[in-house]
Image (cartoon, rainbow, N blue to C red):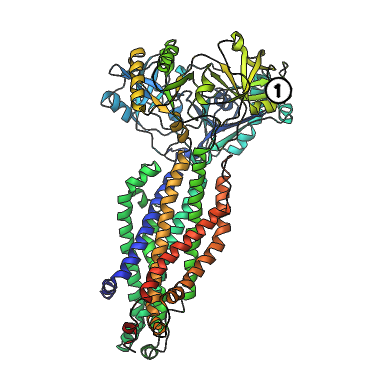
Amino acid sequence: MVAWRNLLKNKIYSFLNITGLAVGLASFLLIALYMMDEVSYDRYNINADRIYRINSDIKLGGGELHMPVTSDMMGQLLIKDNPSIEQYTRIYNSNGNKMIKKDKVFIIENRVAHVDSTFFDVFTLPSIAGNTHTALNEPNTVVITESTAKKYFGSTDVIGKSIETNDDKNPVYKITAVIKDIPSNSHFNFDFMFSMKNAGYNWGQLTSHNFHTYLLLKKGADPKQLEKNFDQYIDKYVLPSVRQFIKISSMDEFRKAGNRLEYSLIPLTKIHLHSDRSFELSPSGNIQYVYIFGAVALFILLIACINFMNLTTARSAGRAKEVGIRKVLGTERRFLIFQFLTESTLMVIFSLLLAIVIAYLVLPLFNDVASKSMVLGSLFSPYILPLLVALPFVVGLLAGSYPAFFLSGFRPIEVLKGKLRLGSSSGGLRSVLVVFQFVTSIVLIVGTFVIYKQLHYIQTKDLGYNKDQVLTIRNTYTMGDQAIAFKNSVLQMTGVQSGTLSSFLPVSNSSRNDNTYFKEATMDINGSLDMQAWRVDYDYFKTLGIQVIKGRAFSPDYGGDSTAILINETTAQFLGYPDPIGKKIYGNDDPGKLKTLTIIGVVKNFNFESLKQGIGPLCFFLRKNGGMASFKVNTANINGLVGKIETLWKQMSPGMPFNYTFLDESFNEMYQSEQRVGKIAIIFSTLAILIACLGLFGLATFIAEQRTKEIGIRKVLGASVQGIVRLLSKDFLKLVAIAFVIAAPLSVWIMNRWLNDFAYRIPLSWWIVGSAGVLALLIALATVSFQAIKAAIANPANSLHSE
């Protein structure tokens, strides 16, 4: 009861302490949820610790590929030669979408894949109906998720029913099983899993890499030992196929020419956070962000706890006379210790309860920002619950230890005679803690500035093409030959400047195609080059604003453009020709048969991959049709124009869904992870600074109260308000200056490591760090000055009348 009365008696002090700690704890809980979700990816699989994906690293000439895919044959050949492999399975996700008919209208579904019949032997995906282990043994079969079954049929009782697609050869598929929805914390998330026998692939291509291949190893098998066998696989199976395209005697000759062909294993549970390759099945996370947010969560918790301890120990100095009187009245020291520890622990418990309420209320908004579906119940996992239970007692003990063990040991006669000066003995510790708070705050401010600047740089960098006001309409392949007529009709509409038909765009969700080319007609390894090969129409470069800096673009005025090729500057540099126009390069789409190609133009380098990657070799061929249409538009009435195009679409392609986006939106999707991290960093950096200021405000209030009589005497002796404000503020500002000296190099080191992920990055300018220091100084000054000015303008008679 005494502890409760003390809390109510000092309402402002209690409010500052409980609120500050509650906000810090709520922030910690939310970040802990985020981190738990990130590290939990794919762990729902019973055999998660035995599942590995095969990655490919290929370098040929100037072209370099880092992919999570292999040939279609690799899994079955490895399991034949390696008894350590229990099972393998593949995912084929070439176009990423399929049209499914519902009520006579097609719907675009983009969470689709073709998988092996062994898919459910490797991954733990519980069945609601049907036997998943045999469901995909036959062609024209499909397994769907529970939510998909309800979406299309209204129930999960759908075994034996059929779905219709827009596939040319096999449009109707029989539903053979229904599974529970795949957990959101999975690196793949499909609604439709079609039989691999309907993939429509040219099987047996050991040099083509299009399949995500997973291995389930036997218990006790060593993945490192299996990786050593990959060289044997390459020599035995891949080398004979490579020889059809390149003249080499051995893989050693291949490597000595500066090339690379390597396979490696990555554990299933590391894919989300440790793999960011081309053609990932979903946007990857980043283990660095988990480390960063873990540090932020810890810092916020420490800042909040430091505030709590600072205010508790500072405030306890004013209770020395209370302790003296109670000791005179016979209260034993152990009861005083128990009271102080109980008070601080009680406050932490209140803070924790309030923090859980805040986290519960804020979680939906946080899920929206982080693109998650987290639930608060995850906090009561075996990893977090012990921490939550222990926290009130640990923080309460630390915060209450000073008044409990130090004040309770005073001789009451000395306290009551005023011979003891209290509060100063812990001032050094409080100074160290304040410095720590502002070191953390400055590092977070710098981090926020840098992330914002880098994201702004990505948005505004000259990419070498024009991504603004480009309307993209997908699935024009459904129109067949009518696609060209559709394009020409749209070009007649007001506000449309130009248009192109192509499956290739400089964003990550468009088609990609790489192939091997040669400088000479000899298939010699030293003159070989692996590069992206895009097929585009006459208007591609004009529509996207890609500059042809040498030669010319494709034109209907030249009948020989069917064997013509344009290259980018990177390719021209590799070829080494001062003027490549008119020169020949050679491709071998068919094994052993070279096709002569004439270079008619060179395009200025443009970023066709993420800015995390450099610009690789790229070439263009002529093709008059493609999978999607893109139009450069210039009109204020975008909605009206889109409406007209949709009307035309429905006339020319009835029953097919109209699906459009803008190129800049597709570009932004490549940086979703960074954008989410930026938003989260800004939110929690702001909270950390506010919590630090809350503690600083409380300390400034306490110091002002401690020096009330001193201030009164100084004013009587003629001290100005400005002089008193300076006197009360300078000690705090010194601490912020010390914090800046420590934080500046630390923040530069941390953010340089983050920026190293980008091939194109901002320079880490000195003014960014300097601005963070100035901002921290201004925030501290504003916080402290409020109390300093209040104390300085107070009437000195009120503080001196008792003397």
> Can residue 308 be seen by looking at this rendering?
no
**Residue under label 1:** 579
Q: Is residue 90 above or below residue 329?
A: above
SS class, disc 1: loop
Residue 374 image point, x, y percent: 36, 44
Q: Amino acid at mark 1?
A: Asp
Quadrant of the rendering where the C terminus is positioned: bottom left
Residue at the (39%, 33%) spot, across then down: 125
Q: Is residue 413 above or below residue 315?
A: below
Quadrant of the rendering where the N terminus is positioned: bottom left
Which of the pair 740/724 is nearer the observer?
724
The quadrant holding residue 690 is bottom left
Which of the pair 162/259 is nearer the observer?
259
The quadrant holding residue 347 is bottom left
Q: Quick check: 259 left or right of 305?
A: right
Residue 626 image point, x, y percent: 48, 17
The quadrant holding residue 171 is top left
> Can residue 608 be seen by looking at this rendering?
yes
Residue 771 image point, x, y percent: 51, 56
Residue at the (36%, 62%) spot, across then down: 20
Residue 26 image point, x, y percent: 36, 55
Q: Quick check: 202 left or right of 370?
A: right
Q: Is residue 224 above or below residue 162?
A: below
Which of the pair 797/740 is nearer the observer?
797
